[in-house]
């Protein structure tokens, strides 16, 4: 197995052969992929060298230290975090070779066409239809809450191929070309005034059967794999105390004594303790991952993050008093960043409301914890073994 | 600031396993419940076995003083396990508070000799402060030292009825001092208080001109007491984690097997969401309690803030756990013959012990530069 020293040597050898300053950015990234130094835990020939996943940071740090260009991962979060592992896990050899390299270099970015107006928490109820016509599938339906759809070249998509089967069994997974004339992307304006997300309308969109991922009817199982990968991304590095929202309100408290009241002080200290406790909990989770003892605490981290962001952003408006009555900008913008700390307190308050809905509502997360971690029985289900087309909706 | 180690090491896991297996044999809840109304509410034999067979009553004490030469991290694991069984043993008074206080005075030979007797389990100790005293409280003034004798009254002293020795903070002619009291000395009166927590007892200590040697004086005495209370508050967070985890586990077992309306009650979202939240809270409590235990192994200022965070989080969480334990057991949880009340009594009392959450948040206000209006 490759170790950290071996990886550093490889990166240095690569850099001695490919001067980042004198090479075209895309050529440099393609060469990095071909050298197996893109995502080191991927197989040889697909951008990796079968190294432990934990060693990726070693490679990224080596490249960053020389000022080499990166693949701008924030513009392709869905591609890198969700589409790529799914294509690796379920794609044919041909699909892996076609899609993974331009995905990693950022030449082709991705979005995710899963949620629908009628299928949010109950994703398996989705109703976008895919009908086979010769070597193609014809798609009709509507997807929603699609980030990056307006910039993405490709989408991972789940559609219903067998309406007569029970809902989990009639789904199939596709790779959809976003430039197809049957795909229309419209901005979806949200309560902050901006449009981070899109609605995507599929009207006779065509997908060749060669872009079906996995077997017909296997879509649900593959989609679950995709969503698992969404949750692996948490953890990150060891963060310092008072980072994020609690740092902002703590600084306001220190700088502006005229805003202080006893009631606000009590609440600030409670929020400070909870934020610090959440930080230490994430750090413990990180240490467990590094030690090879991954725990289920990740789902708790998202619950805490959502709750705290909402409480702190609400607190911040009260602390700011008159200033808390104002808002920075209601215009319909297409933001590059959704970092809560980047805009005004009013924006933070409104945007944080989404934290307990997006990526699994807090209620669904509690079900997951209760059933998968604590082993409690599921609610009785009336929809599981019934043909999808007979379900009330 | 280097990263604290928030995991359990191999030695700590082994310690946990051996304590757990002893408690399984010797401290099931029916025995704890039977003992709490008996003549002997403390299980002295269990404490002796913990001392002689497992050697865990002196985890903080260096080997040259007869201890195990371990530290707060290991002591915290012991506290988790004893908390999980609400074991009626003098952990807090003897192995944590008195031991930490005496170790901080160990250049006095009477203090180091006393530490050895606590470590080997041949004697039990306590610190004569009200159990609600927070680490940042001013040095207690209820006992006066005059002509080398102590006089005064201290209420709610933990583990008092089984304590052979007590470290007594007192004010003498030249200021604060810590004194080492032999509780069998003439002039000592110990009066048990009927406790809310049946598994950890308290009592009133009255002293009438009792001779006792001084083991620390002035700022050294203040530092030693502060150190003992900080260590105890940090270790208590781990005891609360152990107790909360027991409450969760036992509730999950119950709601899986209790059927109403033709379903396991644990299948109702109204029930499972509460347990999911409790599980998440315990994950966090465990992280901050480990952080505090790790911080206590250093002498750094970090210990102050880590302990304050851990205690302000865990002391409320443990009460939530014990209250959910009772509520989700329904009627059976309200009966004397079910152990829920033993856990509730310990949890609620421990919330007041060594400072409430509010007191610890005030410490954070000071150390974290978040001043009151």
Image: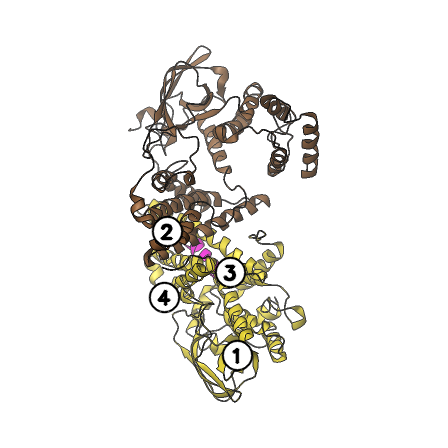
Chain colours: A brown, B yellow
**Camera-side mark, 1 or 4:** 1
Query: Which residue shows up at 46% across the image and 52% down it?
Result: A276
For marks 3 and 2, the one nearer the N-term is: 3
Report how far apart the C-alphas of labels 1 and 2 lie in the structure: 57 Å
Work out whether A293 lies above or below A123: below
Side of A381 relative to A298 (left or right) = left
Q: Position of residue A365 (x, y in %)?
A: 41, 41
Residue tagged 3? B80
Tell me the quadrant of the picture where the N terminus of chain A can be found.
Answer: top right
Answer above or below: position of B160 versus A232.
below
**Label 1 chain ID:** B
- Near mark 3 (Cα within 10 A), the count class, few <14, some 14-19 or many ≥20, is many
Numbered disc 4: what chain? B
Marks 1 and 4 sit apart, C-alpha to C-alpha, by 44 Å
**Label whose residue precedes the other's in the sequence (1 or 4):** 1
User: Mark 2 — residue?
Assistant: B258
Report, in whole angstroms, how far the alpha carbon at label 3 lies from the one at label 4: 24 Å
Give the alpha-carbon distance from disc 3 to disc 2, as whole Å: 28 Å
Q: Position of residue A188 (x, y in %)?
A: 34, 27
Query: Chief secondary structure of the magenta span?
Result: helix
* Disc 4 to disc 2, C-alpha distance: 19 Å
Nearer to us of marks 1 and 3 is 1
SS for dot 3: helix
Position of A274 relative to A382 (above/below) = below
Mark 2 neighbour density, 10 Å: few (under 14) some (14–19) many (20 or more): few
Q: Which mark is residue B336?
A: 4
**What separation in Å lies between label 1 and label 3 (alpha carbons)?**
32 Å
């Amino acid at each position: 197995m490759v170790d950290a020293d071996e990886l550093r040597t490889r990166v240095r050898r690569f850099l001695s052969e490919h001067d980042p300053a004198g090479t075209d950015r895309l050529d440099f990234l393609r060469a990095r992929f071909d050298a197996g130094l893109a995502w080191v835990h991927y197989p040889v020939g697909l951008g990796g060298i079968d190294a432990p996943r934990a060693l990726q940071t070693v490679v990224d740090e080596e490249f960053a230290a020389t000022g080499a260009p990166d693949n701008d991962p924030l513009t392709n979060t869905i591609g890198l975090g969700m589409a790529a592992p799914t294509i690796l896990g379920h794609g044919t050899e041909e699909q892996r070779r076609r899609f993974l390299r331009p995905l990693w270099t950022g030449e082709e970015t991705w979005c995710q066409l899963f949620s629908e107006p009628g299928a949010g928490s109950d994703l398996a109820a989705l109703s976008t239809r895919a009908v086979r016509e010769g070597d193609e599938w014809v798609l009709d339906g509507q997807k929603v809450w699609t980030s990056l759809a307006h910039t993405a070249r490709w989408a991972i998509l789940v559609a219903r191929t067998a309406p007569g089967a029970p809902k989990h069994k009639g789904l199939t997974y596709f790779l959809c070309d976003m430039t197809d004339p049957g795909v229309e992307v419209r901005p979806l304006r949200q309560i902050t005034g901006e449009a981070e997300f899109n609605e995507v309308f599929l009207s006779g969109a065509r997908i060749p059967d060669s872009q079906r991922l996995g077997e017909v009817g296997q879509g649900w199982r593959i989609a679950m794999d995709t969503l698992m990968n969404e949750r692996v991304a948490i953890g990150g590095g060891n963060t310092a105390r008072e980072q994020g929202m609690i740092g902002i309100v703590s600084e306001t408290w220190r700088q502006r004594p005229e805003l202080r009241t006893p009631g606000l002080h009590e609440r600030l200290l409670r929020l400070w303790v909870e934020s610090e406790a959440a930080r230490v909990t994430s750090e413990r989770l990180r240490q467990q991952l590094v030690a090879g003892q991954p725990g289920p605490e990740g789902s708790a981290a998202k619950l805490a993050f959502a709750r705290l962001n909402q409480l702190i952003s609400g607190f911040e408006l009260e602390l700011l008093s008159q200033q808390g009555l104002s808002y920075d900008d209601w215009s319909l913008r297409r933001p590059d960043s959704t970092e809560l700390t980047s805009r005004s307190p009013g924006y933070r308050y409104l945007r944080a409301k989404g934290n307990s809905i997006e990526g699994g509502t807090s209620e669904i997360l509690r079900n997951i914890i209760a059933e998968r971690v604590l082993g409690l029985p599921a609610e009785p289900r009336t929809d599981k073994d019934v043909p999808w087309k007979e379900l009330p909706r | 600031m280097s990263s604290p180690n928030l995991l359990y090491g191999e030695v700590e896991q082994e310690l946990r396993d051996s304590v757990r297996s002893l408690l399984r044999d010797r401290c099931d809840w029916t025995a704890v419940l039977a003992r709490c109304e008996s003549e002997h509410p403390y299980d002295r034999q269990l404490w002796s076995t913990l001392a002689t067979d497992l050697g865990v009553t002196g985890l903080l004490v260096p080997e040259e003083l007869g201890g195990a030469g371990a530290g707060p991290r290991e002591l915290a694991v012991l506290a988790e396990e004893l908390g999980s069984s609400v074991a009626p043993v003098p952990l807090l008074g003897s192995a944590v508070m008195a031991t930490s206080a005496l170790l901080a005075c160990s250049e006095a030979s009477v203090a180091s000799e006393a530490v050895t007797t606590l470590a080997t389990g041949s004697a039990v100790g306590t610190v004569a402060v009200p159990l609600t005293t927070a680490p940042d409280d001013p040095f207690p003034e209820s006992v006066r030292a005059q002509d080398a004798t102590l006089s005064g009254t201290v209420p709610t002293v933990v583990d008092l009825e089984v304590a052979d020795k007590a470290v007594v903070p007192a004010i003498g002619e030249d200021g604060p001092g810590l004194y080492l009291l032999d509780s069998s000395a003439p002039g000592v009166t110990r009066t048990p208080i009927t406790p809310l927590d049946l598994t950890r007892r308290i009592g009133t200590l009255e002293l009438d001109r009792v001779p006792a040697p001084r083991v620390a004086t002035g700022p050294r005495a203040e530092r030693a007491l502060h150190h003992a209370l900080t260590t105890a508050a940090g270790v208590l967070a781990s005891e609360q984690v152990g107790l909360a985890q027991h409450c969760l586990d036992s509730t999950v077992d119950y709601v899986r097997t209790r059927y109403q309306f033709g379903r396991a009650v644990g299948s109702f979202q109204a029930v499972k969401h509460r347990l999911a939240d409790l599980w998440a809270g315990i994950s966090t409590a465990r992280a901050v309690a480990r952080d505090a235990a790790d911080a206590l192994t250093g002498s750094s200022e970090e210990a102050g803030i880590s302990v304050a965070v851990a205690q302000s989080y865990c002391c409320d969480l443990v009460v939530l756990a014990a209250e959910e334990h009772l509520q989700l057991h329904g009627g059976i949880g309200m009966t004397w013959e079910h152990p829920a009340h033993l856990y509730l009594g310990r949890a609620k009392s421990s919330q007041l012990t060594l400072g409430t959450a509010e007191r610890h948040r005030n410490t954070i206000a000071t150390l974290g530069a978040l001043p009151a209006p």
